[in-house]
């Protein structure tokens, strides 16, 4: 199977501005930021999207959210707040079939999203 673009970043085959990395996930700046801070937190284990996540991934999913909070601290956006988003499938706006958590902040974000 062809590697996803995120798998190539995980494998350090293509460059990314990496903010955080541990044995379970990697976080890096989005190439097309939608806010002053826009990072992606990506599990090293390939789960295509949230729809494909199973009970066995429960701890990993929790870890991704805790890392999102840690990245918010690293980026110094946690005092003012931020948004965490997972796009799933066509209507969710997913474009890369490798589960990832968006962390957005650094400006006031509108609700509801488009
Ligand atoms: P999705 O639409 O699937 O929820 O989010 C995919 C995100 O990946 C988009 O925000 C897009 O800008 C970002 N992205 C796509 N290709 C690359 C890349 O090569 N490098 C980085 N850093 N981000 C990427």
Image (cartoon, rainbow, N blue to C red):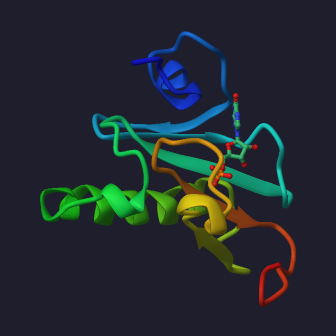
List the single residue furthest toward the top. 13
**Location of ligand 1 given as a quarter of the image:** top right
Estimate the x, y position of residue 80 in percent, counting from the top left: 73, 80
The residue sitting at 85% across, 85% down in the picture is: 110
Estimate the x, y position of residue 76 in percent, counting from the top left: 69, 62
Q: In front: 104, or 8?
A: 8
The residue sitting at 62% across, 55% down in the picture is: 94
Q: Is residue 109 above or below residue 62?
A: below
Quadrant (top left/top right/bottom left/bottom right) for the C terminus? bottom right
List the single residue furthest toward the bottom. 111
> For residue 1, which quarter of the picture?
top left
The residue sitting at 84% across, 61% down in the picture is: 35
Residue 109 horizontal side relative to residue 96, left or right? right
The residue sitting at 37% across, 63% down in the picture is: 51
Estimate the x, y position of residue 70 in percent, counting from the top left: 49, 59
List the single residue furthest toward the left. 56
Estimate the x, y position of residue 50 in percent, counting from the top left: 40, 61
Q: In front: 103, or 2?
A: 2
Residue 52 horizontal side relative to residue 112, left or right? left
Q: Is residue 17 above or below residue 77?
A: above
Residue 77 horizontal side relative to residue 85, left or right? right
Q: How many marks?
A: 0
């Amino acid at each position: 199977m062809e590697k996803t673009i995120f798998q190539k970043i995980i494998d350090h085959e293509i460059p990314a501005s990496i903010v955080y990395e541990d044995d379970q996930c990697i976080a890096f700046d989005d190439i097309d930021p939608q806010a002053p801070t826009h990072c992606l937190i990506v599990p090293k284990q390939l789960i295509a999207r949230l729809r494909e996540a199973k009970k066995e991934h429960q701890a990993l999913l929790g870890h991704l959210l805790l890392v999102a909070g840690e990245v918010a601290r690293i980026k110094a956006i946690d005092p003012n707040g931020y948004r965490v988003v997972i796009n799933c499938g066509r209507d969710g706006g997913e474009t890369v079939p490798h589960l990832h958590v968006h962390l957005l902040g650094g400006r006031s974000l509108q609700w509801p999203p488009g």
